[in-house]
Amino acid sequence: MSIRAAKASDRTGEADLHDRPAVEMRRRGACPALAAPMPTGDGLLVRLRPAGGALTLSQFASLARSAAAHGNGILEITARGNLQIRGLRAETVGQLAADIDAAGITVPDGSAIETSPLHGIDPEGVSDPAAMEMALRSTLRDQLASPRLAPKLSLIIDGGGTFGLSALSADIRIVAQSPADWLVAINGDGETAMPVAIGPAEAAISAVGEILSLLATLGQGRRARDIDPALLRARFPAMDGIQFIPSRAAGMPLAGSHRLKDGKTILGIRPEFGQMRASDLIALLDLAKARGATGIRLAPGRGFFLIGLPADTLPAMQIAAAGHGFAAQPGENSEHIAACAGAGGCGSAFYETRTLARRLIAVAPALFDGSLTLHLSGCAKGCAHARPALTLTGSAEGYGLILNGLAADQPDERIAGGRIDFAIERLARSIEDNKDAGESTAACLTRLGATGVSKALRQE
């Protein structure tokens, strides 16, 4: 949805929201953009991605003020680095859109495209993903906006560098191989995606257009994994000859101060579990601006980078960030927890995920050695984490504990609601007692297996 189109007639926008069939707004898998906000437990939710994931400090502060004025003042950054504004009402979505437009924030039409967060800043970047995004949107505008594409179709443009996107899975990946050449791959992350084409920007854009055409032909809701391999090879006969070197997830952690190769410094900031209050964000941005910060880059991992801070201001900014509820140091236990909005924030959730997360950090530190992710999912949908993890799924009966799986998987153990703190503390103690020298928590859990975990939880 174009922001200017939304602003053109706020009254029309409101009528559209009221008249839209409820089933459309609640369709599972839909992306809650400005054109179709999603009903949740605390009102309507809007997800947006500014072009290139880049904002000025003033623009980010304007978004925070708008979130407080028209929503409930809570903003979130998702695992993929997109921004969410919560607690909106049907009559305030148009006002939010008008504020976004007034701030000069561009939210492109069509499918969201995620780009390397440090594009144009990191001297180790291979090529410019922001320029590729502009060219892609210009050339394939109608295809990217097609209603036949899946609402959550994911495209990634990875320009390489210090903070790449290898860990993110996507339907379509466009990865810089050299300043002149791009690899196009589908259905996977930097290690598992299937390469289909390689060449200069024009050839890569043409290949993306072919893939979008295939997806549109398959019908709405289909993803790259649904494309018949034979059909794919018919469109890309040279794909089997592509020399592909898998790119494993690596690079620097998000939170903390980082010095780039050219000596410039940046500060990675993570709101606790990806959620922040508008007042805290505005206070942090005011401090950052006073100390010389010049820009914001939203980043995968539920955080953002502050750009332009002089190196001698970073320690004070890290302390100030912590005072407003942000993590600005690496290695904090909250980094290893993926928590959804939970009860109160989502009508589907059966427990308060973030409240439980804070308790578990206190009572079960053995779980947080960095070897695994603890996924706290309020229900079986698993919105916060799409990969196997140590998962706690909420249900009407209590909790389902899944040792290494998704929220919708069959639980390895069921835990009554009132016993959850005791059960997790017992599990953590069992891990401490059974760990071999040098063994990680993840490895110990794997060795204990469902039988060992069940025995540990039943001990009194």
Image (cartoon, rainbow, N blue to C red):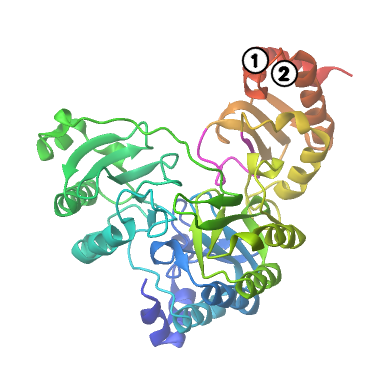
Q: Position of residue 213 (x, y in %)?
A: 18, 51
Q: Could you tell me the amino acid type at mark 2?
A: Val
Mark 1: give few (<14), some (14-19) or many (20+) Cα within 10 Å: some
Where in the figure is residue 451, as x and y percent of width and height? Answer: 69, 13
Visible residue check, residue 337: no
Residue 241 in view here: yes
Tell me the CA gap for discs 2 and 1: 6 Å
Magenta stretch: includes residue 202: no
Residue on which disc 1 sits: 449
Seen at 58% across and 26% down, the residue is 404
User: Residue beneath label 2, please?
Assistant: 453
Farthest residue, direction right = 460
Amino acid type at image mark 1: Gly
Q: Is residue 409 left or right of residue 353?
A: left
Quarter of the figure with the C terminus? top right
Q: Considering only vertical position in the picture, is 430 above or below 318?
A: above
Q: Look at 69% across and 57% down and name the residue there.
A: 315
Which residues are drawn in magenta?
373-387
Residue plotted at (22% across, 65% down): 142
Q: Nearer the viewer, residue 406 or 133?
A: 133
**Position in image of residue 396 (x %, y %):** 71, 41
Q: Decide: marks 2, 1 in contact (CB < 8 A)?
A: yes
Q: Which residue occupies 44% across, 55% down?
A: 117
Q: Is residue 366 found left or right of 402 in the rendered image?
A: right
Screen quadrant of the N terminus: bottom left
What is the number of the mark on residue 326?
none
Q: Is residue 97 positioned above or below 395 on the image?
A: below
Secondary structure of the magenta portion, mostly? loop
253 left or right, relative to 41: left
